[in-house]
Image (tube, grey):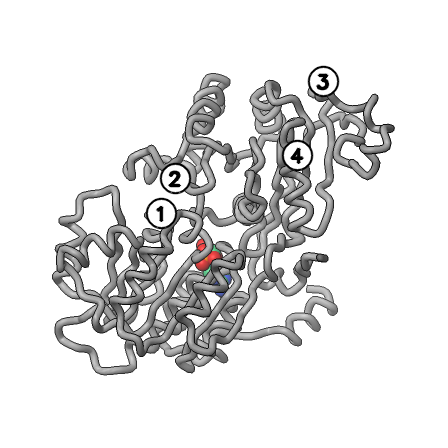
Amino acid sequence: MTSIEVLISQITYMSFESLGLSEELLKAVAKQGYTEPSPIQSKCIPVVLEGKDVLASAQTGTGKTAGFTLPILQILTKGTQLRKRPIRSLMLTPTRELAAQILENVNQYSAFLDIKSTVIFGGVNQNPQVAKLRAGVDILVATPGRLLDLHNQKLLSLANVEILVLDEADRMLDMGFLRDIKRILALIPAKRQNLLFSATFSKEIKKLAQGFLDNPVMIAATPENTTTDLVKQKAYRVDKGQKTKLIIKLISEGSWSQVLVFTRTKHGANRLSEKMVKSGISAAAIHGNKSQGARTKALAGFKAGEIRVLVATDIAARGLDIPLLPHVVNFELPNISEDYVHRIGRTGRAGASGEAISLVSADEVDYVRGIERLLGEKLKTEVIEGFEPSNAPAETADKPQQKGNHFWKNKPKGKGSGNNSSSGNWNKNKRIKFKRKSN
Ligand code: AMP
């Protein structure tokens, strides 16, 4: 460590101990290898322990799950444990993958506590889930549809819920869960603690928050709609029909080992994954039409390094917990700018740097504009030799209406980019500056 780094660590060092967590939780955190809390954890844990409502702006990858789970576990273990174990904390989340990951974290953090937790989500047989509920759980992680379904069948009660977490609230609204959420809110006691986490804050989210949060403490891990400096963003201009060839070249020549690729449609995800496999790159597609088993298998293979490329749609990829992902590629840009922020949030996580590449065809220029407006900065663009877009407006660049249209002006670049990833820890986050949206 240089003397400056020592100085920085002395100034900003905060420990899990100083957040007021119990011995059992400190032990569990140490077992996970966490040496210090992430920024959202430092802010969130003391506030939740005080029993306050929280409205937090945090993307996946910030450590938010521990930010709400650790203090909830502490609160739940303080009171006397009822023999029948009614559900005392409900964690609502949009996708089955995310739900399963939250439960995994809850189990890790409660390893030394007398706490029982389970998860319920749709698309699979309900019986094993019901059996676990019957045995009694303190914490229930759930997707809204299955929760209401089992409640309607009188297979669970929410009458004893003390702490409610809405995780990835923006995505829940995007997926049309607003009515379900309202129904669920009506089923739990009015007097409770509420924690709402969202990566972005639309008008709808603010309205939802106002509707049920009580004087919440506002917490931001990353300012609204921002991307971290650790994510190197780059766009390559290319013809639509050349994208597959280009992505295969980038992955092979850059020797990228773990790549998450986004397509706009399920069909597109399947097609691209098949083409990758044909060209000798191990790949799998993950989207809503795939069975739970197929999704879990693909994700496990990807995490284990057996599958090099995971091709996903936005909804399927939401909440995937893949630590230290070095490369994210937007094979197609999302038509909702906020999704770009979510997508590139899959890289540069937990203090590691990463690269987010977008392949942009002429019909997607408007999406680039939207993304740039949201980020408050221009995307760096390049052209790869041999992949020059056919309608590259060398001839249009001088036209008055093209002024300021930087997007089609850059010169071709010789080589694809290499692997820029490096590993790190939360300590490095102290030196991350977040770019705030400028408008
Ligand atoms: P999350 O944003 O909750 O999905 O967490 C992202 C990743 O960071 C997960 O793989 C966690 O296990 C990991 N993580 C959470 N807290 C810490 C911490 N304090 N130090 C290092 N890694 C952490």
Residue 199 in view: yes
**Residue indicated by mark 4:** 418
Q: Is 350 displayed left or right of 231 in the figure? A: left
In which quadrant of the rendered image does the N terminus lie? bottom right
C-alpha distance separating marks 1 and 4: 30 Å
Q: Residue 13 bears which disc, if any? A: none
In which quadrant of the rendered image does the C terminus lie? bottom right
Q: Residue at x 30, y 75 (%)?
A: 190
Task: Evaluate if marks 2 and 1 touch, with contact meaning CB atoms under 8 Å apart.
Answer: yes
Q: Point out the tag, 2 or 1, that comes first from the N-terminus.
A: 1
Label 1 sits on a secondary structure element that is helix
Q: Point out the tag, 1 or 4, that comes first from the N-terminus.
A: 1
CB at mark 3 closer than 8 A to ligand 1?
no
**Residue indicated by mark 3:** 390
Q: Residue at x 52, y 60 (%)?
A: 58
CB at mark 1 closer than 8 A to ligand 1?
no
**Residue indicated by mark 1:** 97
Q: Point out the tag, 2 or 4, that comes first from the N-terminus.
A: 2
Q: Point out the tag, 3 or 2, that comes first from the N-terminus.
A: 2
Q: Point out the tag, 3 or 4, that comes first from the N-terminus.
A: 3
Q: Is 263 displayed left or right of 364 in the figure? A: left
Q: Nearer the viewer, mark 1 or mark 4?
A: 1
C-alpha distance separating marks 1 and 3: 40 Å
Q: Nearer the viewer, mark 2 or mark 1?
A: 1
Residue 410 or 257: which is nearer the viewer? 410
**Residue type at tag 1:** Glu
Q: Nearer the viewer, mark 2 or mark 4?
A: 2
